[in-house]
Amino acid sequence: MPDFTPPPAGLAPAPPLTRALVLVMAVSVGATVANLYYNQPMLGAIAADLAVSPSAVGLIPTATQLGFGLGLLLLVPLGDQMDRRRLILAQSAGLAVALVAAALAPGAATLVLASVAVGLGSALVHQIVPLAAEMASPERRGATVGTVMSGLLLGILLARVVSGAIAAAAGWRAVFWLGAGLAVTVAAVLARALPSRSAPPGSLPYRRLLLSLLALVREEPALRRAALIQAALFGSFSAFWSILALRLQTPPFAFGSFAAGLFGFAGAVGALAAPLAGRTADGRGPYGVIALGTMASLAAWAVLGLAPGLAGLIFGVVLLDLGVQMTLIANQTVIFALRPQATGRVNTVFMVTMFLGGAFGSLVASMAWARGGWGLVAATGGLLAGAALLLGGRRRS
């Protein structure tokens, strides 16, 4: 049987979670998650410098995301068994080494391997988010998670802009050197700011620790529901972003890739709304926020499908991002309250399911675009958002 027992008696309680520490956590996850997206605007420069084909250089972001997925599955559950502070610092050190390896990579093969390691190290963001949820008081859990996640969302938003500007001015290797410096800085700040014993050590063997993920899925219907809702919404979200650049190349737009990148600034709406969504979930319960977020996402696809102009596209993406992020924060408020001694594993189940939903959304959107253009893509995104709305309406099942 999986070990979900409470910590042993006599374990010192975690120190109070101050606003300053929450801010440190938010900035740390933002600086860390950015490493997953730095490479995307630089692929052309990397291909030219290393003299590799576009198809070969395309393996770099894929390898980074693969490493991140492996980190979610294999490393994040360890936070329930080990001193989470030490685990965070160890992953930060590993991330810094991986970024230095990327900066020094002599060829594409080395850079792909380093990118896998960068993804593995970057998974430490999902050690920090459960830690914030553990340390927060129950009545402040939603607001705390929302604030920390706003840092993560802003990190995703700004990563491409920053890396593109630095790569243009100083070359693509300078971006990885910057990332390595930030990883060391984050480790130093967290070493000073985090409590010295942020999680009780456990005795569950690693194999049983991973198998306990299946027990969580089986025993926690609220976790299954939250994960499936977010998977459907993230699939809807990924469907939009995977096709946006292609959509903008067609009439009535005829825009280039730079314009597609500018749409990323719409993510600021979701990032700014995250703390508000968390506070609302604390005060009025998370399920109303989930319902509102899924309805906003469905409405966004109605706008995107029926309003063909630029204004409709901008309003639709703002509404879609807002709905997805609201629901994400509310669902995390739900899952982190389920098993206080298994927040790492709960988060692993939730995030892995969500990313699988995102991959599915990108796949079906590509098929829809090839067969029916933007109209079929909008219908596909709407169906995924509608599925999330139906799942959210079954919260008592």
Image (cartoon, rainbow, N blue to C red):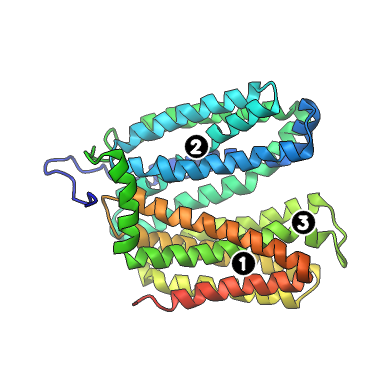
Disc 2: which residue: 120
| Residue 269 percent location from the top left of the image | 60, 60
Which mark sits nearer the N-terminus, 3 or 1? 3
Disc 3: which residue: 245
Residue situated in front as seen by the camera: 49 or 174: 49
Query: Residue type at mark 3?
Result: Ala
**What is the quadrant of residue 255 in the picture?**
bottom right
Residue situated in front as seen by the camera: 231 or 22: 231
Q: CA distance from mark 2 to mark 1?
A: 29 Å
Q: The C terminus lies in which quarter of the figure?
A: bottom left
**What is the quadrant of residue 218 in the picture?**
bottom left
Q: Nearer the viewer, mark 3 or mark 1?
A: 3
Disc 1: which residue: 320
| Residue 302 percent location from the top left of the image | 67, 77
**What is the quadrant of residue 385 in the picture?**
bottom right
Q: Residue at x 58, y 28 (%)?
A: 99
Going by the picture, which residue comes out furthest to the left? 9
Which mark sits nearer the N-terminus, 2 or 1? 2
Q: CA distance from mark 2 to mark 3?
A: 28 Å
Q: Residue at x 76, y 76 (%)?
A: 307
| Residue 337 percent location from the top left of the image | 31, 59
How many C-alpha atoms fall within 10 Å of the one at disc 1: few (<14), some, or many (≥20)?
A: many
Query: Residue type at mark 1?
Result: Leu
Q: CA distance from mark 3 to mark 1?
A: 17 Å
How many C-alpha atoms fall within 10 Å of the one at disc 2: few (<14), some, or many (≥20)?
A: many
Q: Residue at x 58, y 49 (%)?
A: 154
Does the image show residue 140? no
